[in-house]
Amino acid sequence: MKKIIISLSLIAFSCHLFSQEDAWVYLADKENGAACIAHPLTILSQKAIDRKARHGIAIDERDIPVNENYISAIKNADGISVLAKSKWFNAVHVRGEKTAIENLFINQNTLIQPQKTFISKIIFADRSHGAIEKVANTKRRNKFENILTDYNYGNANQSNQIEMINGDVLHQEGFTGEGITVAIMDGGFPNVSTMSSFKTLRDAGKIIDDYDFVNRDDDVYSNTSTNHGTLVLSAMAGYIDTAAKNYVGTAPDASYYLFITEDNDNENPVEESYWVEAAERADSLGVDIINTSLGYDDFDPGFKYDYATSDMDGQTAYITKGANIAFEKGMLLVTSAGNSYGRSVGAPADSPNVLSIGAVDSRGDYAMFSSIGTNYQPTIKPDVVAQGASSYLINEYDNIVTSSGTSFSAPILAGGIACLWQAYPGMSNLEIMNLVRESASQYNNPDFYLGYGIPNLETALTELYALDAADTSENNQMSLYPNPIRERLYINLPTDDFATLYLYDVLGKKINTFQVSNDSNSINTSELANGIYVVRLETSDRIDTFRLIKE
């Protein structure tokens, strides 16, 4: 969160930095592209390759690392510091005086041997600089705000945040996140390596790895400037079972990567670049879910990097563009909507490809600090909500505490979704996202405060069971295609018989009825909203049920 008290030395340091600019330098090409794609184990883990294959996601040029020779050339340029890199954008984040950054483009042939043009464009974080190219920038607004198979979840207040979304039902069904990998992007995880609340997680090898992208080291536990990451992890993976107290996170058996992408001392666009770089690493490691309890829309005073509300349009902010690619790569992004007290959601929660989570209190009522959606977002925001007011968490001293913010409603729900995805790991990120939305309390009447409402993960799991039963039934004579659909659905009947097609949403509400035959065997689905549907086909002698996905 932004620091309320700023020392005089920090003010002086910030004034010195006013002459410094941040920019993204986009590179022209990559090295050994065809060979890397032909031999993907040279650039991706086997888990990442398997996940992509399972969901039909191609390995492409974006998976190839940035050319290190180009990075070295830029680092050697006068007055330039390279702070982050992105293989998805084939870009590096640099800092230096405006003239020095412009000279990168002008003098690029002299920076590398053999001489060549290797920089395609430079986009300044301060969009008022139009000498090379303008860009919209980002403002971090989701402040770190501090205002519990049979599990003992603790007292009624603690258990409510799990029971509100029926995550306890998934636990009782044996779904506790096993086999699902979550990457947490945050600001620090003090004492996680020694706390008793995470001993079960550590002993099982469920904390797979960690990295600090800000300080470029693998120590995420000694950073005591914030305990935010520890609190977030506890919402998903904390576990205490003693005579004195009990606590269970929403995904106690999932596996976790802990990444620091938030610079707690400064608010600068480079934090977006750290996040994108971490997301790229998560993809290469085969991560399923990214939890981000951060958001961006304004920066430190004195810079011209702030995003306007109109920039929260799902495609402008650098971090949002990175999130869109992460979704294309098959990961599910669960992100805090923000704590802006009635102002718009920040980035990357503005993306239609991000499941943005608002906050409610223990009664399910809107929490006044939770950011809201606007007409600038292309889809309803927030998507859904969970308990974020007085959430029960575990701090770095192994104490159960309460804290408020969408920073905590997001991981509470992210853990529940990990359990849901464990039940059907073959489902795509889009299918899981839509299923969560469609299970929510006000799916048929969403608004800008609660989005689609409070998800019911028991309903979502029951629907998966029903769809699975439908898919395994004997429907070898009647068929639907294509599936997923976009514009038109075709029906194949076994005879010249007529059939009645009933179309239901995921909650069982009938949407429409059609009469079909082999002579009139298609229906227009272009106006149908994206999501999961159930189709019931009835002929004179049989009834078949199908799952249908609209993209």
Image: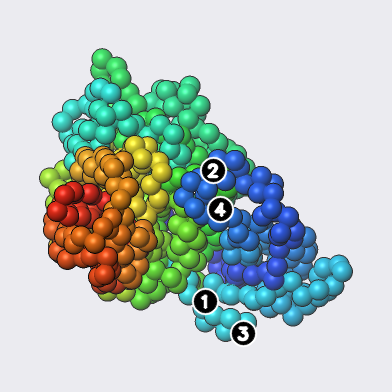
Q: Earlier in the sequence, mark 3 or mark 4?
A: 3
| Mark 1: amino acid | Val
Q: Quadrant of residue 412?
A: top left
Residue in the foreground of this view, choosing between 535 and 313: 535
Are the residues tagged 4 and 2 within 8 Å (C-beta)? no
Residue in the foreground of this view, choosing between 186 and 4: 186
Query: Is label 3 or label 1 in front?
Result: 1
**Along the horizontal axis of the image, is 163 left or right of 193?**
left
Name the residue tied to disc 1.
135
Name the residue tied to disc 3.
131
**Along the horizontal axis of the image, is 233 left or right of 492?**
right
Looking at this rendering, what residue extends furthest in the front direction? 496
Are the residues tagged 3 and 1 within 8 Å (C-beta)? no
Query: Is label 2 or label 3 in front?
Result: 2
Q: Earlier in the sequence, mark 1 or mark 4?
A: 1
Name the residue tied to disc 4.
280
Secondary-structure class at tag 1 = loop
Distance (Cα) linking label 3 and label 1 = 11 Å
User: Which percent across, then down, holds residue 218?
Assistant: 60, 39
Residue in the foreground of this view, choosing between 518 and 472: 518
Q: Earlier in the sequence, mark 4 or mark 2?
A: 2
